[in-house]
Amino acid sequence: MSRSRLLSLFSALAAALLLTVAPAHADEAQEISLLMKQGQRDKALERANNFLATHPKDAQVRFIKGLILTEQNKAADAIKLFTSITDDYPELPEPYNNLAVLYASQGQYEKAKTALEMAINTHPSYATAHENLGDIYAKMASQAYDKALQLDKGNANAQAKLAMIKDIFSKPAPRQPAKTVLAANAPATTKPATPVVPPATPALASAKPATAPITPVAIPAKASESAKPVAAEKPAPESGKGDSKEAILAVVEAWAKAWSSKNVSAYLKHYAPDLVLAKGESRTNWEKTRKERISKPKSISVTIASPEVKSSDATHAKVTFKQIYRSSGLNSETWKTLLMVKANGKWLINEERIGR
Amino acid sequence: MMSKIRPVIRFFLLLMLGLVALPAGGMGDLLPPLQYARSHNGNPEALLVNILLKIRQNRLDAALQDVDALLHVNPNFRLASLIRGDLLMARAKPLTAFGSAAGGTPEQVADFRDEARVRLQRYLDQPPAGRIPKYLLQMQPEQRHAVVVDTSKSRLYLFENNAGEPRHVADYYITVGKAGAEKLREGDQKTPLGVYFVTANLAVEKLSDFYGVGAFPLSYPNEWDKRQGKNGHGIWLHGVPRDTYSRAPKASNGCVVLANPDMAALGKTLQAGLTPVVISERVEWVSVEEWRSQRERFKGEVDAWRRDWESLDNERYLKHYSPAFSANGQDFTTFSTQKRQVHAGKSALRVKLSDISIFQYPGKENLMVVTFTQDYHSNNLVNVMRKRQYWQMENGQWRIIYEGSA
């Protein structure tokens, strides 16, 4: 399991929360997470507890407290806390992800799997959860294989657990931008170029401190090229050639309309042939999954709110908006970013990300 | 529920299943898998077959659910664990072959594939309805059951004695010798082919866990085997160690091994000293009519021998014996000389046969194993004994090639 993915997950979670939950107390949350990042866990925890005494439902601070508890090796408490966040905010995929990481570190792969499926259920295109789920499946598969081949079960389990902790948290590996977007983009809106929350794990204590931030830091370098505030503030002159922001937005609205009317073929026509998918996922499979998800609910309504369009050049644009999804089975509100590309005179979605 | 199954695994699972040819025109006569599984009331093999067929239909999520349920009840069903591993692993990464990601040796994976193949084959190729193995020509009344083993199909069939006519009761997956069938000598790790009888019911508590819930020695080597110079010993029907549900199709040292629940069920029907166990490489099934006419024909042969013996006409009597006859240290010459002497002193002889069993030998040897109670009543001797004869077809005639007490 690539721990870097889960590593970034932690920071991503906090980042995403800052965005998705109205950050009334963002400053407090940031200060607590800064304390945690500096290694002052007890102090951070105390401050979080004080804050929660008056704001018991605050998602951000509860989330950060969960990370602190995880760092303190209080997995049971952390699981309890993250579970309570999922109870209160079932539309957020991140607490589910975190739960999965905790369960996985305990070898409870079935529970980890269920948690990740919940995350994916709320956010079908959540690449990190998909990948983590793939890793969980691999772990479960290897347990099944060990049983089939009668390998020493006691040992195998222990190794799997240790390997997971080590894998998850101590060997940063190069990552694909698609999976790190949350981590990369979030800082831009809060604190540029700093992970909002340091990766928090029991293993971190023994890992080289320098390795921890590598992932979150490394990614922005790439992603920020198109996301620099500078670029954003300049009303991209390139977009002048008839491709007004309104024109691009109209495409996004049409996409939401196709989705809302459950018109799968019209919906899928909005995606570029080289759409960026989760690692290992085939286009065919993705289309199939999308088709199932769009067909299943009796009704769907997708509303685009607070859209922002940024074009870096005549054929590339980034559209960020709040996606309000209502269906017979699920309601969710999330920030979404579409990376659009113009091909043959048409704007198509090249990549779809959760967050902004 | 997401489904990130790679086409690759589909291809390979299909390839695995492709080892078993489906009947032309689909599955016409077969019960649909679900109905089959239900009709077998939670039978692990039926559930496994159901899972394999779901994989074949690309219903991989459903297959995974079923395999979880199967393993919940039978956690030591290693083949099911392997399939579960593949179904899970296929969601994580592409698989190159059945069990390829398991980290086992090629032999281990091949064993699992073979087990899956023979179990699936049992479903696709069900015992022919209305037909019976040609071996069970006549069961004596006390023989409540007969066992027929097909080593090529890794299958043991249990028949009940329904007024002399064998009726299929159940059949079970089995493990046979590592080196296959046709045992010749000690240590060759092969399962013998022939007509045997259960000789004992061993007390499990005195045996190691290796033999599982039951152990029933067979009469290998029998009279015919010894005559052929075959040797070795300790060929049993037995169960498996408790840490596994089943063993690979070819894994024993020659014994016929069953899953413990199957051994327990079969064990209840086995009678020490009585139950016949016919082991064949490929069981031949015949229609009831064919079976009945063969039985009557052969019973006529035995009765002719009995009548000719009663006639005390040595030529008529001895023509039932093969020139290759040998038994108890006698060849045909010494045997016929002795019989002529005995018969010379007799004025009257009555021979009654009862409790006759007749089993045809498997394979190419045209051989019958006949066992009966012989009530011999002459002017100077009365004797009742249990006798066994081996009859062989020679130039279109059935001749006795061995006889002795049983």
Image: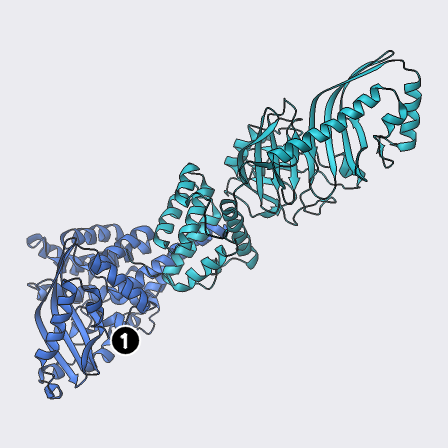
Q: Which residue is mark 1?
A: A273
Residue B352 in view here: yes
Image-based side of A107 in relation to B182, left or right? left
Q: Nearer the viewer, residue A45 or A315?
A: A315
Rendered residue at 34%/72% (across/down): A173
Chain corresponding to cyan in the figure: B
Looking at the image, residue B141 lies above or below residue A141: above
Looking at the image, residue B351 lies above or below residue B70: above
Residue A31 in view here: no
Task: Name the secondary structure under disc 1.
Answer: loop
Q: Quadrant of residue A262?
A: bottom left
Image-based side of A322 in relation to B372, left or right? left
Q: Where is residue A101 drawn, in percent x and y? A: 28, 58
The subunit carrying tag 1 is A
Quadrant of the rendering where the C terminus of chain B is positioned: top right
Rendered residue at 77%/33% (across/down): B391
Q: Residues within 10 Å of mark 1 (few under 14, many from 20)?
A: few
Q: Where is residue B373 drawn, in percent x and y? A: 73, 20
Q: Quadrant of residue A332?
A: bottom left
Q: Where is residue A143 drawn, in percent x and y? A: 42, 53
Chain corresponding to blue in the figure: A
Image-based side of A63 in relation to B14, left or right? left
